Amino acid sequence: MSAPASFTSREALSERRLQDPSKPAPQRKKRVIVTGGSGKLGRWMVREMVEHGWEVWNLDVAPPAASEAKVAKFMQVDLTDYGQVVAALTDVDSGYKGVDAVIHLAAIPSPSRAPNHVIFHTNIRQTYNIMEAARVLNITNLAIASSETVFGIPFYPHVPERLPITEDAQAPESSYSLAKLLGEKMGEQYTRWNPEAKIINIRLSNVMSPDQYIDFENWQDDPWIRAWNGFCYIDARDCAQAFRKAIESSLKGHHVFNIANADNTFRVPTADLMKKVFPNTKWEPETSDPREGGISIKKAREMLGFDPKYDWQTECEKLKKASK
């Protein structure tokens, strides 16, 4: 009789461990790769998926903060290197063999963080490598971070004709936003090549972590400060919810969704902000909320069941009480 193989079609080398035979074998969880899981949004994304029953691996060039180190497994991967991406999505000794879904957040996160060509080359190469590796490995469930900057943010000198702005707007004004739009276009073609695949690009608004809400108080007398993106933001935890719902949805093909919180960044009605800052732009609210934000989330609500849970005023009050 030949010796048993050190691995199986579903298990990597040295992944298996001795188990107590009197106990039932542990069930394998669905496995998701989160790229950029050490970042501002990534830490909440990792927690969201773990809390909803997924086995999560964080792929990043930087390790997570000490407080996040035990939430999920971390692996250092340079996503601009296609070979590393294929290897990381395939078979990792003592780790896993194969993945069920990928959430791609990793990127240089905004314009002016590096020279233009560095931002473009880095971000577009990472996105291509993820999509191409997923294609050759037949991973058909992807959610990929796009950006509100695809709309033409900052909204000057090309002021929108109407707000809230919807997913059909495409007017990138930076190398960063150009790379994000081209990432969406790549998703269209990859799902055309495989109609059974799902690639969802999520256009994030300005991501806010819970500790940042105290800063909103400094803006209240000057709406021009937040005019650049239609007075919008997205709580990192609500953003993580949107990605999870995208991954868990039964959709197929390519889809683009706006993700923002339901309210604006001020205490006054959005109509008042519009009159002052965007007097020539049509304000056509989609809800009865007088403080509805300038980015439409109607499509995400209807197709993903996205439902923002957090608002800046409540979170700001929590911070004030905690500081006393």
Image (spheres, rainbow, N blue to C red):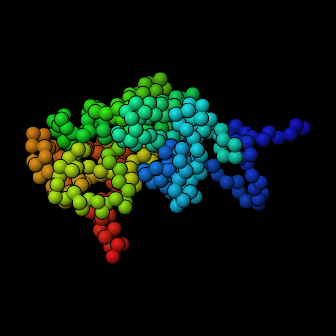
Quadrant showing the C terminus: bottom left
Foreground of the two, 35 or 52: 35
Q: Is residue 16 left or right of residue 43?
A: right
Q: Quadrant of residue 212?
A: bottom left
Residue at screen point 64% across, 51% down: 27
Tell me how many marks there are.
0
Name above or below for residue 248 compared with residue 311: above
Foreground of the two, 195 or 166: 166
Quadrant showing the N terminus: top right
Name above or below for residue 104 compared with residue 82: below
Q: Is residue 53 left or right of residue 250?
A: right
**Residue 52, percent from left and from top:** 50, 54
Q: Is residue 96 left or right of residue 13?
A: left
Q: Farthest residue in the bottom direction?
A: 324
Residue at screen point 17% across, 49% down: 224
**Residue 50, percent from left and from top:** 52, 54
Q: Is residue 95 left or right of residue 167?
A: right
Name above or below for residue 251 compared with residue 29: above
Q: Does residue 181 appear anywhere in the picture?
A: no
Foreground of the two, 239 or 65: 65
Residue at screen point 49% across, 26% down: 194
**Residue 190, percent from left and from top:** 46, 27
Foreground of the two, 174 or 87: 174
**Residue 150, percent from left and from top:** 31, 35
